[in-house]
Image (cartoon, helix red, strand yellow):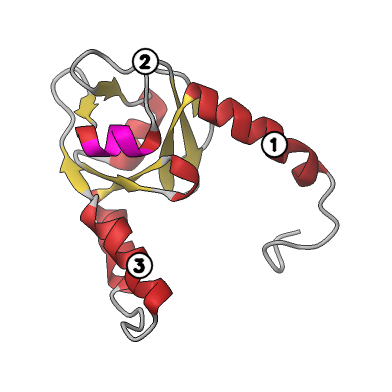
């Protein structure tokens, strides 16, 4: 399970070192793709296959499902960490997420997310209060 937040840097070649505590969970290869809120999702190859199997069941007659599938899958890039545990983030994905030098990598259960640090800070500031004030269960049965 991927948990926690780390602040690595993007190098000049578009590579990032995945935090050491994520490496065991992410395995020898990862799939990076567009996420919601202009971040990138990072899945282990095995977890991506599980997600892919589920989304293949989406109804193609539903325009919103088609749009989601197109954006999610067309940006997906399989990457293998190099000997220094760096993965390359392809230029179109860096552009989508607005990645600059400073990044935030956060664990979100079964996947990680990569954010531009300024975008993450803005997201966290905008959502912290509403999170603290939740009055209803967002995920039924969790608490």
What x and y, as percent, mark residue 65? 38, 73
Q: Residue at x 70, y 68 (%)?
A: 140
Q: CA distance from mark 3 to mark 1?
A: 27 Å
| Residue lying furthest bottom | 61
Q: Residue at x 27, y 63 (%)?
A: 70
Residue 78 appears in which quarter of the rendering? top left
Residue lying at 34% horizontally and 48% vertically, measured from the top left:
34
Q: Residues within 10 Å of mark 1 (few under 14, many from 20)?
A: few
Dot label at residue 41: none
In depth, the one of 76 and 138 nearer the eye is 76
Span shown in magenta: 92-96
Q: Is residue 140 above or below residue 91?
A: below
Q: Which tag, 2 or 1, sits closer to the chain's start?
A: 2
User: Magenta stretch: dominant SS?
Assistant: helix
Q: Report helix, strand or loop for mark 3.
A: helix
Residue identifier under label 2 = 101
Q: Which residue is mark 3?
A: 67
The image shows a total of numbered marks equal to 3
What residue is shown at x 37% (from left), y 20% (from top)?
A: 100
């Amino acid at each position: 399970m991927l948990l926690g937040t780390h602040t690595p840097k993007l190098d000049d070649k578009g590579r990032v070192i995945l935090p050491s505590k994520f490496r065991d969970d992410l395995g020898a290869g990862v799939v990076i793709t567009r996420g919601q809120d202009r971040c990138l999702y990072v899945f282990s190859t095995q977890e991506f296959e599980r997600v892919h199997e589920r989304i293949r069941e989406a109804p193609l007659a539903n325009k919103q499902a088609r749009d989601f599938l197109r954006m999610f899958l067309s940006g997906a890039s399989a990457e293998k960490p190099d000997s220094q545990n760096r993965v390359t983030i392809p230029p179109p994905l860096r552009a989508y997420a607005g990645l600059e030098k400073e990044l935030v990598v956060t664990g979100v259960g079964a996947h990680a997310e990569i954010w531009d640090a300024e975008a993450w800070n803005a997201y966290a500031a905008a959502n912290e209060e509403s999170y603290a004030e939740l009055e209803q269960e967002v995920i039924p049965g969790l608490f």
